[in-house]
Image (tube, grey):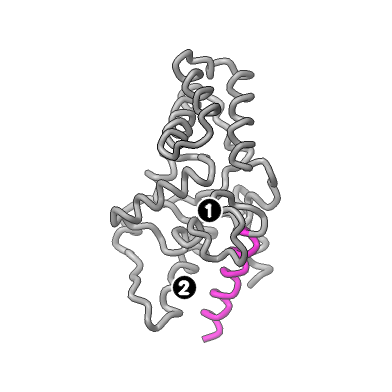
Amino acid sequence: MGDVLGSLEYDETPSARIKSFLLLFNIASIISNDKSIVRFRFDYFKNEQWDIEHIRSVASGRPKANIEKRPWLETVRDYLAETGSETGLRERVKEMLELKTYTTGESFDLLYDAILGHFKEYESTEAENGMGNLALLDSGTNRGYKNAVFPIKRRRLLQYDQEGTFVPLCTRNAFLKCYSQKVENMFFWGARDQDDYRRAMVTTLANFFAH
Protein backbone atom coordinates (compact mmCIF):
# COMPACT_ATOMS: atom_id res chain seq x y z
CA MET A 1 0.00 0.00 0.00
CA GLY A 2 2.86 2.36 0.79
CA ASP A 3 4.36 1.87 -2.67
CA VAL A 4 1.00 2.53 -4.31
CA LEU A 5 0.42 5.77 -2.41
CA GLY A 6 4.02 6.80 -2.95
CA SER A 7 3.54 6.55 -6.70
CA LEU A 8 0.62 8.99 -6.75
CA GLU A 9 1.55 12.54 -7.71
CA TYR A 10 -0.59 15.58 -8.37
CA ASP A 11 -0.45 16.57 -12.07
CA GLU A 12 1.11 13.20 -12.94
CA THR A 13 -1.64 10.84 -11.76
CA PRO A 14 -5.24 11.05 -13.09
CA SER A 15 -7.20 13.17 -10.62
CA ALA A 16 -9.99 10.58 -10.45
CA ARG A 17 -7.52 8.02 -9.08
CA ILE A 18 -6.26 10.38 -6.37
CA LYS A 19 -9.82 11.36 -5.45
CA SER A 20 -10.74 7.69 -5.17
CA PHE A 21 -7.92 7.04 -2.71
CA LEU A 22 -8.78 10.12 -0.65
CA LEU A 23 -12.46 9.17 -0.61
CA LEU A 24 -11.61 5.60 0.43
CA PHE A 25 -9.32 6.93 3.18
CA ASN A 26 -12.25 8.90 4.59
CA ILE A 27 -14.66 5.98 4.44
CA ALA A 28 -12.17 3.49 5.87
CA SER A 29 -11.34 5.87 8.72
CA ILE A 30 -15.01 6.07 9.70
CA ILE A 31 -15.99 2.42 9.46
CA SER A 32 -12.80 1.21 11.19
CA ASN A 33 -14.19 2.54 14.47
CA ASP A 34 -17.24 0.62 15.67
CA LYS A 35 -18.04 3.38 18.14
CA SER A 36 -17.87 6.18 15.58
CA ILE A 37 -20.95 8.38 15.29
CA VAL A 38 -19.53 10.21 12.27
CA ARG A 39 -21.30 9.69 8.97
CA PHE A 40 -19.94 10.47 5.54
CA ARG A 41 -22.32 12.74 3.62
CA PHE A 42 -22.53 10.81 0.36
CA ASP A 43 -25.49 12.94 -0.74
CA TYR A 44 -23.47 16.12 -0.37
CA PHE A 45 -20.41 14.52 -1.92
CA LYS A 46 -22.44 13.40 -4.92
CA ASN A 47 -24.22 16.72 -5.48
CA GLU A 48 -21.20 19.00 -5.04
CA GLN A 49 -18.03 19.25 -7.08
CA TRP A 50 -14.82 18.25 -5.31
CA ASP A 51 -11.21 19.19 -5.88
CA ILE A 52 -7.89 17.81 -4.80
CA GLU A 53 -6.45 20.49 -2.58
CA HIS A 54 -2.83 21.03 -1.58
CA ILE A 55 -2.79 21.28 2.20
CA ARG A 56 0.24 23.51 1.97
CA SER A 57 0.60 26.01 -0.87
CA VAL A 58 2.85 25.06 -3.78
CA ALA A 59 5.40 27.06 -5.72
CA SER A 60 3.54 26.57 -8.98
CA GLY A 61 0.43 28.21 -7.52
CA ARG A 62 1.82 31.75 -7.39
CA PRO A 63 -0.88 34.17 -8.65
CA LYS A 64 0.08 35.59 -12.02
CA ALA A 65 -2.86 37.65 -13.28
CA ASN A 66 -4.01 40.78 -11.45
CA ILE A 67 -7.47 39.26 -11.09
CA GLU A 68 -5.83 36.48 -9.04
CA LYS A 69 -3.38 38.65 -7.10
CA ARG A 70 -5.94 40.98 -5.54
CA PRO A 71 -8.16 38.38 -3.85
CA TRP A 72 -5.07 36.49 -2.69
CA LEU A 73 -3.76 39.65 -1.02
CA GLU A 74 -7.19 40.46 0.43
CA THR A 75 -7.33 37.04 2.04
CA VAL A 76 -3.92 37.58 3.64
CA ARG A 77 -4.89 41.09 4.79
CA ASP A 78 -8.11 39.86 6.40
CA TYR A 79 -6.36 36.97 8.16
CA LEU A 80 -3.63 39.19 9.58
CA ALA A 81 -6.25 41.71 10.72
CA GLU A 82 -8.44 39.05 12.36
CA THR A 83 -5.54 37.45 14.19
CA GLY A 84 -3.84 40.75 15.06
CA SER A 85 -0.52 39.40 13.88
CA GLU A 86 2.41 40.89 11.98
CA THR A 87 1.18 44.50 11.71
CA GLY A 88 4.13 45.52 9.54
CA LEU A 89 3.35 42.92 6.92
CA ARG A 90 -0.35 43.74 7.11
CA GLU A 91 0.39 47.40 6.38
CA ARG A 92 2.47 46.43 3.36
CA VAL A 93 -0.40 44.33 2.01
CA LYS A 94 -2.92 47.07 2.72
CA GLU A 95 -0.77 49.67 0.96
CA MET A 96 -0.29 47.45 -2.09
CA LEU A 97 -4.05 46.93 -2.37
CA GLU A 98 -4.80 50.64 -2.00
CA LEU A 99 -2.14 51.76 -4.51
CA LYS A 100 -2.68 48.72 -6.78
CA THR A 101 1.06 48.20 -7.04
CA TYR A 102 0.39 44.47 -7.31
CA THR A 103 0.02 45.14 -11.03
CA THR A 104 3.80 45.45 -11.10
CA GLY A 105 5.11 41.91 -11.15
CA GLU A 106 8.34 42.60 -9.28
CA SER A 107 6.61 44.46 -6.44
CA PHE A 108 4.05 41.71 -5.98
CA ASP A 109 6.67 38.98 -6.09
CA LEU A 110 8.72 40.64 -3.35
CA LEU A 111 5.70 40.92 -1.06
CA TYR A 112 4.49 37.43 -1.98
CA ASP A 113 7.86 35.97 -1.02
CA ALA A 114 7.81 37.92 2.26
CA ILE A 115 4.34 36.56 3.08
CA LEU A 116 5.31 32.96 2.35
CA GLY A 117 8.50 33.47 4.33
CA HIS A 118 6.49 34.72 7.32
CA PHE A 119 4.29 31.62 7.22
CA LYS A 120 7.31 29.35 6.55
CA GLU A 121 5.78 28.09 3.32
CA TYR A 122 9.21 28.18 1.69
CA GLU A 123 10.88 26.13 4.39
CA SER A 124 10.55 22.98 2.32
CA THR A 125 9.07 22.08 -1.05
CA GLU A 126 9.81 18.38 -0.67
CA ALA A 127 6.97 16.09 -1.80
CA GLU A 128 4.60 19.03 -2.24
CA ASN A 129 2.63 17.12 -4.89
CA GLY A 130 2.60 13.78 -3.06
CA MET A 131 -0.32 12.26 -1.15
CA GLY A 132 1.06 13.64 2.10
CA ASN A 133 0.08 17.12 0.94
CA LEU A 134 -3.29 16.38 -0.65
CA ALA A 135 -6.85 16.37 0.69
CA LEU A 136 -10.44 16.52 -0.56
CA LEU A 137 -12.13 19.90 -0.55
CA ASP A 138 -15.32 21.14 -2.16
CA SER A 139 -14.60 23.23 -5.22
CA GLY A 140 -16.24 26.38 -3.87
CA THR A 141 -13.96 26.51 -0.85
CA ASN A 142 -10.93 25.43 -2.82
CA ARG A 143 -11.29 28.04 -5.53
CA GLY A 144 -12.08 30.76 -3.01
CA TYR A 145 -8.84 30.05 -1.15
CA LYS A 146 -6.74 28.67 -3.96
CA ASN A 147 -3.10 28.36 -2.90
CA ALA A 148 -3.67 30.29 0.32
CA VAL A 149 -1.09 29.62 3.01
CA PHE A 150 -1.81 26.78 5.45
CA PRO A 151 -3.07 28.82 8.46
CA ILE A 152 -5.57 30.72 6.29
CA LYS A 153 -6.99 27.49 4.86
CA ARG A 154 -7.03 25.97 8.32
CA ARG A 155 -8.91 28.90 9.86
CA ARG A 156 -11.57 28.90 7.16
CA LEU A 157 -12.12 25.14 7.26
CA LEU A 158 -12.55 25.23 11.03
CA GLN A 159 -15.12 28.00 10.61
CA TYR A 160 -17.02 25.82 8.14
CA ASP A 161 -16.86 22.91 10.58
CA GLN A 162 -18.17 25.07 13.44
CA GLU A 163 -21.02 26.24 11.22
CA GLY A 164 -21.99 22.66 10.46
CA THR A 165 -20.84 22.70 6.84
CA PHE A 166 -19.69 19.28 5.68
CA VAL A 167 -15.91 18.93 5.67
CA PRO A 168 -14.56 15.41 4.97
CA LEU A 169 -13.27 13.85 8.19
CA CYS A 170 -9.72 13.27 6.99
CA THR A 171 -9.44 16.78 5.55
CA ARG A 172 -10.54 18.18 8.89
CA ASN A 173 -8.14 15.89 10.76
CA ALA A 174 -5.23 16.94 8.56
CA PHE A 175 -5.77 20.65 9.16
CA LEU A 176 -6.15 19.95 12.89
CA LYS A 177 -2.89 17.97 12.69
CA CYS A 178 -4.53 14.89 14.21
CA TYR A 179 -2.14 12.67 12.25
CA SER A 180 1.01 14.51 13.28
CA GLN A 181 3.00 12.59 15.90
CA LYS A 182 4.82 15.71 17.06
CA VAL A 183 3.19 19.10 16.72
CA GLU A 184 5.71 21.92 16.88
CA ASN A 185 3.72 24.54 15.01
CA MET A 186 -0.05 24.37 14.45
CA PHE A 187 0.20 26.92 11.65
CA PHE A 188 2.77 25.19 9.46
CA TRP A 189 2.45 21.97 7.43
CA GLY A 190 5.94 20.58 7.17
CA ALA A 191 7.68 17.48 5.85
CA ARG A 192 7.17 15.59 9.13
CA ASP A 193 3.44 16.33 9.06
CA GLN A 194 3.25 15.07 5.50
CA ASP A 195 5.07 11.86 6.40
CA ASP A 196 2.77 11.19 9.37
CA TYR A 197 -0.34 11.93 7.30
CA ARG A 198 0.79 9.61 4.50
CA ARG A 199 1.68 6.91 7.06
CA ALA A 200 -1.84 7.18 8.52
CA MET A 201 -3.25 6.61 5.02
CA VAL A 202 -1.11 3.51 4.53
CA THR A 203 -2.05 2.03 7.92
CA THR A 204 -5.77 2.79 7.59
CA LEU A 205 -6.10 1.43 4.05
CA ALA A 206 -3.95 -1.64 4.77
CA ASN A 207 -6.16 -2.53 7.73
CA PHE A 208 -9.27 -1.89 5.66
CA PHE A 209 -8.24 -4.32 2.92
CA ALA A 210 -7.01 -6.86 5.46
CA HIS A 211 -10.51 -7.40 6.87
Q: Quadrant of residue 109?
A: top right
Question: Chief secondary structure of the magenta span?
Answer: helix
Q: Which residue occupies the foreground of this view, 29 or 192? A: 192
Location of mark 2 (residue): 29
- Mark 1, secondary structure of its residue: helix
Can you give x and y, in whole percent of width and height, for residue 120 in the image?
A: 63, 42
Give above or below for 198 relative to 112.
below
Q: Which residues are magenta?
A: 193-211
Q: CA distance from mark 1 to mark 2?
A: 21 Å
> Residue at horizontal 46%, vertical 55%?
136
Q: Is residue 14 left or right of residue 82?
A: right
Can you give x and y, in whole percent of width and height, for residue 60 in the image?
A: 62, 37
Q: Three-letter amino acid code at disc 2?
A: Ser
Q: Which residue occupies the foreground of this view, 210 or 63? A: 63
> Residue at horizontal 44%, vertical 40%?
83
Can you give x and y, in whole percent of width and height, for residue 63 in the image?
A: 55, 30
Tell which circle, 1 or 2, labels the residue nearer the N-terminal end. 1
Q: Quadrant of residue 168?
A: bottom left
Between disc 1 and disc 2, the foreground one is: 2
**Any magenta on residue 182?**
no
Give above or below for 77 relative to 135.
above
Q: Residues within 10 Å of mark 1 (few under 14, many from 20)?
A: some
Can you give x and y, in whole percent of width and height, for residue 191 in the image?
A: 67, 55
Q: What label sits on residue 15 in the rendered view?
A: 1
Q: Residue furthest bottom?
A: 211
- Mark 2, secondary structure of its residue: helix
